[in-house]
Amino acid sequence: MYGLTIEAGLADLKGRYDLYGPIHKGLRRAQGEMLTRLGTADFADPAALGTLGELRRLLELGAAHIGHEETHVHATIARAEANRVDLLERQHESHRETHVRLEALIRAIEQAAPAERPSLGRRLYLVFGVHIAHDLLHMFEEETVAAPTLWATQTDTQIAGMEHAIISSLPPEKNMAFLSLMIPAVNRDERFALLSGVKAGAPKEAFNVVMEVIARPNLSREDFSDLNERLNRAEMQTV
Ligand SMILES: [Fe+2]
Ligand SMILES: [Fe+2]
């Protein structure tokens, strides 16, 4: 299911709309950090329960992400190459099964006596690690096989339209949660493009919240200044 096609060569972006790139960078970063935290957690200590709550929220975002792809992207890929979507949806199904297993482990730790938590925590660490391994391979498939199918059959405006449909379908707090994954995970050019889109599409107050509550605390001083200056420069050029 997770066979790779690296030998077939990696398609370069060549300036095309990168639907998968920023959200996948966000998921890779957040999942990698979470794995490190689970690896260092002292599960006998009640403080570890806070980490479990954050893991649960991260899994919810991952589950929402695969739902968004199925609702807003897969039909277009299927029209071009039906078997591509079959593979992606089998991988999604495997993710859903792992999500159920992870949620059961989280609940077991929450309900266990302190002395029983470390061995359950080790299980959680191992299962979450293998979940990330599968997700890395799945995202590789999407960015090297599904994305080129989109580029071959859709204009950038059409691909951006799929992303817009996803954003429009979400309540503000979910969009904020996804932005908090993406903003610290992407490079400066991608971050400027992402925030330019937010600035153009969201109310001014919401944009200010994204800048002050998500971007500023999660970026280095230099990265935040770079972002702010680029956005200001772009605004001056449009005036
Ligand atoms: Fe996916
Ligand atoms: Fe994905």
Image: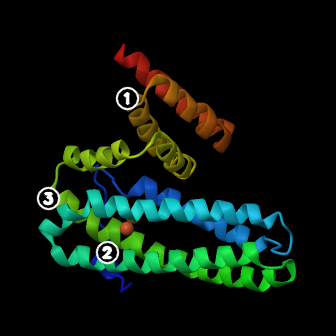
Residue 85: quadrant of the picture: bottom left
Amino acid type indicated by mark 2: Leu
Residue 132 at what x, y percent from top left? 54, 74
Amino acid type indicated by mark 3: Thr
Q: Please report contact status of discs 1 and 3: CB closer than 8 Å, yes or no.
A: no
Query: Left or right: where does residue 151 sit relative to residue 179?
Result: left
As measured in the structure, the alpha-carbon distance from the residue carrying label 2 to the one carrying label 1 is: 32 Å
Residue 30: quadrant of the picture: bottom right
Front of the two marks 1 and 3 = 1
Residue 13 at what x, y percent from top left? 31, 56
Q: Is residue 43 above or below residue 158?
A: below
Q: In this view of the protein, which residue sits in the foreground, 141 or 58?
A: 58
Q: Which mark is residue 61?
A: none
Q: Which mark is residue 153?
A: 3
Mark 1: give few (<14), some (14-19) or many (20+) Cα within 10 Å: few
Whether the residue carrying mark 3 lies under 8 Å from ligand 1 is answered with no
Residue 43: quadrant of the picture: bottom right
Image quadrant containing the N terminus? bottom left
Amino acid type indicated by mark 1: Ala
Q: In this view of the protein, which residue sits in the foreground, 22 or 97?
A: 97
Mark 2: give few (<14), some (14-19) or many (20+) Cα within 10 Å: many
Query: Left or right: where does residue 137 sit relative to residue 76?
Result: right
The residue positioned farthest toward the top in the image shown: 239
Q: Which mark is residue 200?
A: 1
Whether the residue carrying mark 2 lies under 8 Å from ligand 1 is answered with yes
As measured in the structure, the alpha-carbon distance from the residue carrying label 3 to the one carrying label 2 is: 18 Å
Q: In this view of the protein, which residue sits in the foreground, 30 or 115?
A: 115
Q: Which residue is mark 2?
A: 88
